[in-house]
Amino acid sequence: MRSTLVLTVAISAMAACSSGCTVTRSSDNSGGEKNRSGAGSAAPGGVSTGNALETRGSGPCPKPGFITEVEDGRLWVLKPGQKKSGKHVTLIAAGPAGMTMRAVDKATAFEYLGTKAGFDVHAEKVGDSYALWVLKPGQKKSGKHITLVAAGPRGMTLRAVSKATAYEYLSAKPGFEVHVEKVGDSRALWVLKPGQKKSGKHVTLVAAGPKGMTIRAVSKATALEYLAARPGFDVHVEKVGDSHALWVLKPGQKKSGKHVTLVAAGPRGMTIRAVSKATALEYLGKRDGFKVKAEKVGDSYVLWVLRPGQKKSGKHITLVAAGPRGLTLRAVDHATADAYKASL
């Protein structure tokens, strides 16, 4: 029987790290919120997120099974029971928003980077490098497995018991169920919203998915919303004549007859609609790990880009026309601006 991945987290409720990483410091470096059910707690040699929808990490940039802390601009990542140590590994610019990461060992750091809800991940040393096992609940590592070279975080090789599992891992997005199906010599990616089911009557977007997979969905709106999903925003596709428009909304906002329109600015050339230009520009400027804030300056806008723990400051650097749609970027330092530009 084909096993399937089910991810039903609301788009607007993605992990806090993806929407900007609110920094909260703990005086107890070894403590943190533990798995409420106990079933998804970290185990030696890997991180279990089988109950990831109920389990949350602790600290800034939280991920299930980890305790995190920002210290001097660097992100410590620890599993429950681990403590910060002078003897640690450092991964420069590997973390959210290009932050340097620290961990007690390389496996912990790599498992943090590779963690996704609905999967168990295990970093395994292979010669001088590491491979990342990705497993769905109930699966176990096996000598009979598939390998995708350099497909994982930091260019790690992925290992999985099937190609479908590996591709579902790469394709997973909160708010959608993803199912990989073999079609001849290639694969198709079904994307479904909660409550939807696969159907013989469906739309197809050729080569639009990860790894060049063809996307299948019960409607074009579902397929386009999957492609347009970004952390911190609700997205809604509306048919307008023969084309589609993409509404982008921040939590608490609602569609309105009074709105701004950015023609052909969205994924696959969709027109973007938003209740304000700042919302539309922040959507376009959003990148994992960064907090972005569009600010009106005269008749135009600038885009502030901030790493976890940073705040807007009168002392900042400005990069003219360096952001999306030619936006001027502001950041508290060159390192932040450079990391953001590298993510574009």
Image (cartoon, rainbow, N blue to C red):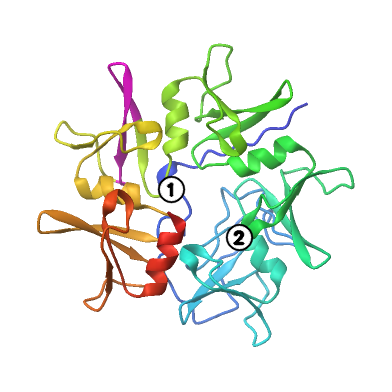
Return the residue at label 1. 13
Q: Is residue 240 magenta?
A: yes
Q: Is residue 261 left or right of residue 283?
A: left
Q: Amino acid at mark 2?
A: Leu
Res 344 → quadrant: bottom left
| 150 and 225: which is toward the camera | 150
* Residue 247 seen in this snapshot: yes
- Residue closer to the observer: 194 or 247: 247
Q: Is residue 289 visible?
A: no
User: Given this view, does label 1 or label 2 mark the residue nearer the observer?
Assistant: 2
Left or right relative to 223: residue 53: right
Q: Position of residue 279 (x, y in %)?
A: 25, 47
Which residue is found at the position 9% from the left and 58% from the top?
298
Q: Quadrant of residue 107?
A: bottom right
Q: Which residue is mark 2?
A: 113
Looking at the rendered image, the quarter that the N terminus falls into is top right
Q: Spot the residue most to the bottom.
A: 86
Residue positioned 40% across, 32% down in the render:
268
Magenta stretch, residue numbers: 237-251
On whether residue 198 falls in the magenta region, the answer is no
